[in-house]
Image (spheres, grey):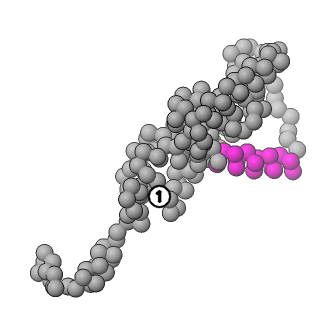
Amino acid sequence: MATLENGDKRSSATRAQWRSRAGRSRTEEPGALDLARPDLSALYAEHYRALVKLASFYVDDRETAEEVTQDAFVKILGGPYHIEPGKEGPYLRSAVLNGARSALRKRRVRRAHKPEPLALVGAAEIGGLQSAEHDRVLAALRTLPERQAAVLVLRFYLDLSEAQIAETLDIARGSVKSHTHRGLAKLAKLLEEAPIQ
C-alpha cells in the first residue's frame, strides 16, 4: 500500500481512478497541444489577422473572412484534434483555406438559385487606377488552378516561406517552387492579355 501526502493508504488501482477523476487532459499524448488552455489566446493573437487576410482573398468579404477564421479556431478548440507544438500555424491556415473554399461553394449554390440585383457602378474618380490594377490582379489570380493560386497567395499575400507553404498545403518544397513558377508565368500572361481599361 502506498501512502499519499494526506496519509491515506490506497491501492495502485484506487490511485489510478483517483488520478482519472482529477480531470486529466484529453490530449495527454506526447507532443499534443490542448487548445482549451491559455495557448489559445496566444495563438489567436499571433495568427488571427493573417488568417482573416488569407480568407478575405478567397471570399472577398471581410465579415465572411472573419467568420471562416473564427470557425477554424472553434473547430480545433471543440474537436478531438492533437496538434504538435509549432504546427498550429500551418494547421490553422489549412483550416481557413478549406473553410474559405467551402464558403465559396455555398455562395455559388445560393447565387445559382437566386438572381443577383444589378450592382451600382461607382464614379471614375473613386478608387482610381491603383484599385483597378489591384482588382485586375485578383481577378487573374482567381482564374489560376487552385493549387497555383493558393501557393501564390500564401507566398506573396501572406509572405510565407516555401517551407511554411509546403507545410500548410501538405506538399513538397519542390512542388511549391514549380507551382510558384508556373503560376507566375500564367499570371503574367493573363495580365498581358487583359490590360486596364
Q: Which percent across, then down, holds residue 177? A: 62, 29
Residue drawn at x 76%, y 28% is: 139
The extreme front residue here reads 174
The extreme left residue here reads 7
Majority secondary structure of the magenta segment? helix
Indicate the quadrant containing the C terminus: top left, top right, bottom left or bottom right. Answer: top right
Q: Is residue 64 left or right of residue 87?
A: right
Which element is circle 1 on? loop
Residue drawn at x 56%, y 50% is: 72
Residue 74's place in the image compared with 188, above or below, is below
What is the tally of numbered marks visible in this picture?
1
- Residue 103, magenta (yes or no): yes
- Residue 58, magenta (yes or no): no
Which of the 4 quarters of the picture holds residue 162? top right
Q: Nearer the viewer, residue 58 or 70?
A: 58
Residue 103 visible? The answer is: yes
Which of the 4 quarters of the picture holds residue 196? top right
- Residue position for label 1: 82
Indicate the quadrant containing the N terminus: top left, top right, bottom left or bottom right. Answer: bottom left
Residue 21's place in the image compared with 82, above or below, is below
Which of the 4 quarters of the picture holds residue 193? top right
Q: Which percent across, then down, holds residue 53? A: 58, 35
- What range of the chain is rendered magenta? 99-113
Residue 14's place in the image compared with 87, above or below, is below
Q: Is residue 128 left or right of residue 176?
A: right
Residue drawn at x 16%, y 81% is: 2
Crowd class of label 1 (few under 14; some 14 to 19; many from 20; radius 10 Å): some
Residue 12's place in the image compared with 32, above or below, is below
- Three-letter amino acid code at disc 1? His
Q: Which percent across, then down, holds residue 97? A: 63, 44
Residue drawn at x 75%, y 48% is: 105
Q: Nearer the viewer, residue 196 or 194?
A: 194
